[in-house]
Structures are given as C-alpha cells and as structure tokens.
Image (cartoon, rainbow, N blue to C red):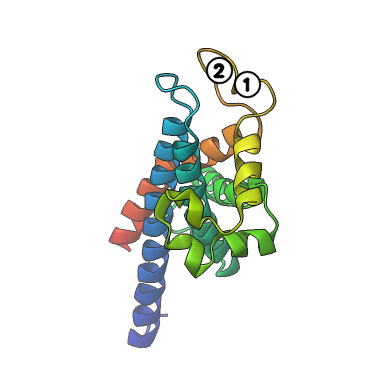
Amino acid sequence: MEEQPNERHEARAAGRDAYSTYSRLLLDALTTAEALEASWSPRHGRDLASERNALFCALRLDAECQLALWNEQALPPESVATAATRYDVYAAIATVHQVLPFSQSERATLRSRESMQNVGFADESLITAPHLVDRWHEWLWPAGVSSLPHRAQPRGQGALLNEGCRRLGVELPEVMQALRTV
C-alpha cells in the first residue's frame, strides 16, 4: 500500500521535530561536558565559578532531557538508528535526567526566569537558591577529592553526568545524520 501525501507530510514533520530535539540535546550535552571539564581542570585548582557554570549548563541539558522523555523522543526511531545506538541515546538521556542532585521542585527553582538570567550563575549575589548551588559544589566533588593537589579524575555522580554527555556527543550526530536522509 502506497503512503498517502498527508502521511508523508506527518512523517517529515515528526522527523524535523526529532531533529530539532536532538540538535538541542547535542549542543547542551557538548556545552555541559566542556563546562564540567573546565571545572575539573587541574591547572586552576578549585574554581567555584567554573563549577557554577557547569551547573547552569547541566540544568539546561536536564530540561532538554526531561522534554525528550516526556515527548517520547528519547528513543530514536528504529528507522534511523541501530538498537545499540537507540539504547545508548536513551540511557544517556535518562542518566542525565536522573543523576542531578535536585528534586523536580529544586530544579524548577534553579531554572526560574530570575535564576537563568544570571548566565552561568556568574554573579553570586543574584543566585536565588545558594544552598542548592552549595549542594552542587559538594556533589561535584565528593569528600576529599577537591582537596587533592592535582585534582583526581571525577568520581561519583558527576562522572556519570559527564559520561551521559559524552555518550550523547558520540551517538546523536549519527542519529541526526540518519534523520536528514529520511
């Protein structure tokens, strides 16, 4: 049975929506990974401003992951990705969304309009929930790690967040390329 014009139009629209979602996810994953790496850099010692910027980026990525999960776009279509790629993308999105040390209401507080206007949480005096930012600093560097002279490799949940970002950075370009040809 031949596909009708309306069905083709709907399929293309769904592909554009998915491409847009994956494009935002990819950009935010790469930005978050870069911010995390900067906050873990051994060259500068502990840099709370870099850590706050990583939080800002992680919150943006988390919002995109949550949206992808709600819109059922976290699992790429079978027509554009292998089972392994589909699993990796879904697992990375779910990991990023689940690993942050904040409840949904705390995330909403951190992502409030007022908070997000303070790009990268650069101005400490404008931070609306300093106790949540302090929790991020503690979460990012489990006890004892931040005091090491040459900064050990990240451990714990922060390392999982970074791995989720890395996996999205590797797998999403393949999915997006396949979506362009559909």
The residue lying at 56 percent from left, 51 percent from top is: 93
- Judge whether 161 appears above or below 110 on screen: above
Identify which residue, 122 or 175, lies in the foreground.
122
Mark before the other along the chain sequence, 2 or 1? 1
Horizontal and vertical percent for residue 126? 49, 57
Horizontal and vertical percent for residue 14? 41, 73
Crowdedness of circle 1 by 10 Å Cα count: few (<14), some, many (20+)? some
Q: Is residue 74 visible?
A: no
Horizontal and vertical percent for residue 139? 65, 37
Name which residue type carries label 1.
Answer: Val
Furthest residue toward left: 181
Which residue in the structure is indicated by mark 1? Answer: 145
Asked if the residues shown at circle 2 and circle 1 are in contact, with their CB atoms under 8 angstroms apart, the answer is yes
Furthest residue toward top: 149
Say left or right for 72 vs 49: right
Quarter placement of the N terminus: bottom left
| Image quarter of residue 152 | top right
Identify which residue, 23 or 103, lies in the foreground.
103
Name which residue type carries label 2.
Answer: Ala
The residue lying at 35 percent from left, 69 percent from top is: 16
- Judge whether 124 appears above or below 39 on screen: below
Which residue in the structure is indicated by mark 2? Answer: 152
Quarter placement of the C terminus: bottom left
Report the Cα–Cα distance between label 2 and label 1: 7 Å
Crowdedness of circle 2 by 10 Å Cα count: few (<14), some, many (20+)? some
Give SS at disc 2: loop
Horizontal and vertical percent for residue 71? 55, 70
The residue lying at 37 percent from left, 64 percent from top is: 20
The residue lying at 67 percent from left, 47 percent from top is: 101
- Judge whether 63 appears above or below 8 on screen: above
- Judge whether 39 appears above or below 15 on screen: above
